[in-house]
Amino acid sequence: MQNEENFVKRSRKPILPRSLFNKRIVFLGIQLKSGYKLRHLLIVPLMNATLAVTNFYFNIGIIFLLRDPTLFGLSEQDLIKTLSNLTFTSTMF
């Protein structure tokens, strides 16, 4: 019985010291909860920036594809209508 109690007491020790989890990170006045890293905070604006840059290059590339006479050959008026429709429907809500 005493061996079982000692085993339970020894097995309840944390693998990592608690001081690692109690550190609070402050970045630009934002205090992160314990257990969170700086990468968790920065991923949100970085993902938005990545999507914006990708969307920009896609929109520029699609203009050249639609104007090319061997592919679509749209006139300037049709090109403007098509691009506005594509931009509207591809915008994430």
Image: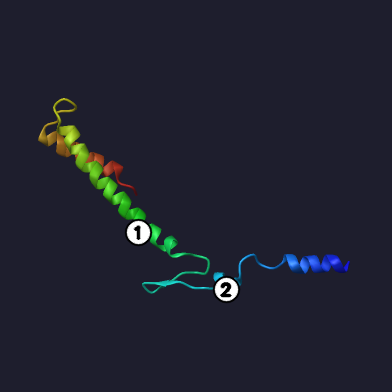
Question: Which corner quadrant of the image does residue 83 belong to?
Answer: top left
Residue at 61% of width from left, 66% of height from top?
16
Q: In this view, does 91 lie to the left or right of 16?
A: left
Residue at 39% of width from left, 61% of height from top?
42
Residue at 46% of width from left, 69% of height from top?
32
What separation in Å lies between label 2 and label 1 (alpha carbons)? 29 Å
Residue holding disc 2? 19
Query: Can you tell which mark lies on residue 15?
Result: none
Residue 68 is situated, as x and y percent measured from the top left of the image, at: 15, 30
Q: Do the residues labelled 2 and 1 touch (CB within 8 Å)?
A: no
Question: Which corner quadrant of the image does residue 62 belong to?
Answer: top left
Question: Which corner quadrant of the image does residue 85 belong to?
Answer: top left
Q: Is mark 1 on a helix, strand or loop?
A: helix
Residue holding disc 1? 45
Q: In this view, does 36 lie to the left or right of 91?
A: right
Depth order, front residue of 11/49: 11
Residue at 29% of width from left, 41% of height from top?
89
**Closer to the eye: label 2 or 1:** 2
Identity of the amino acid at label 1? Pro
Q: Earlier in the sequence, mark 2 or mark 1?
A: 2
Residue 56 is situated, as x and y percent measured from the top left of the image, at: 24, 47
Residue 25 is situated, as x and y percent measured from the top left of the image, at: 45, 71
Q: Is mark 2 on a helix, strand or loop?
A: helix
Identity of the amino acid at label 2? Ser
Residue 51 is situated, as x and y percent measured from the top left of the image, at: 32, 49
Q: Residue furthest top?
A: 70
